[in-house]
Image: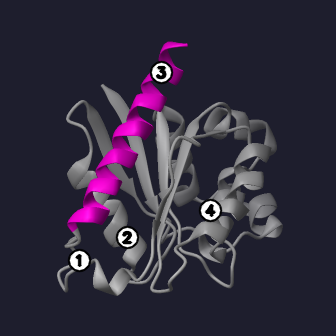
Amino acid sequence: MTKLIGISGSLRSGSYNTMLIKAAARVMPVDVEFRIETIRDIPLYDGDIETKSGIPPAVTALKNTIAAADGVLIASPEYNNSVPGVLKNAIDWLSRPPEDSKRVFGGKPFGIIGATPGGFGTILSQNAWLPVLLTLGTQPWFGARLLVSRAPTVFGEDGTLTDKKIEAQLRSYVEGFARYVRSYQSS
């Protein structure tokens, strides 16, 4: 069974990206174990904390979970035409210490999706993530893009995806990403 980790790049309780990653879990292929993780308990990166106390437990736990997974799917918001600080902060912590970064990220397939209230989706955020993911040695999937714009109109008040067109696009995306991860595993 293919093991994927899902991470929302937002901490907001009503986050459209958290709704999107939960929707991804509902349409994931049956032969995929999909586990949603959180970055909520990861503190702001501070080299002094790392030197004095080591890697925080929340970071260590997420690092181990990612290292044991076959791939990672990120639902990233777009803030000011770029990546959200909280998710970038989490990635920075996850890459510490540098000698452990390869265990966590090296050769790991990553997919990026995103939702936003704006009209252009999260294309700039997704583009901004690519140099970061490549620097970490991941294998980003370029087989498709999912850019959910006008998010308040595609999610219900209960957080479920109500737009059937977007749901079909999400299903197609996660099926393609799962195939990519499986093919990457077998190579």
Relative to 134, say whether 178 is above or below: above
The residue identified by callout 3 is 183
**Three-letter amino acid code at the position of disc 4:** Gln
**Pointer 3 with pointer 2, Cβ within 8 A:** no
**Three-letter amino acid code at the position of disc 3:** Ser
- The crowd level at tag 2 (other Cα within 10 Å; few <14, some 14-19, many 20+) is many
**Pointer 2 with pointer 1, Cβ within 8 A:** yes
| C-alpha gap between disc 3 and disc 2 | 27 Å
Q: Residue at x 45, y 77 (%)?
A: 149
Residue 136, image x, y percentages = 74, 44
Q: Which mark is residue 18?
A: 2
The residue identified by callout 1 is 159
Task: Answer with left or right where residue 49 lies relative to residue 138.
Answer: right
> Looking at the image, which is closer to me, 80 or 154?
154
**Three-letter amino acid code at the position of disc 1:** Gly
Task: Answer with left or right where residue 159 lies relative to residue 66.
Answer: left
Choose top left, top right, bottom left or bottom right for residue 115. bottom left
The residue identified by callout 4 is 126
> Looking at the image, which is closer to me, 92 or 24?
24
Q: Residue at x 29, y 49 (%)?
A: 171
- The crowd level at tag 1 (other Cα within 10 Å; few <14, some 14-19, many 20+) is some
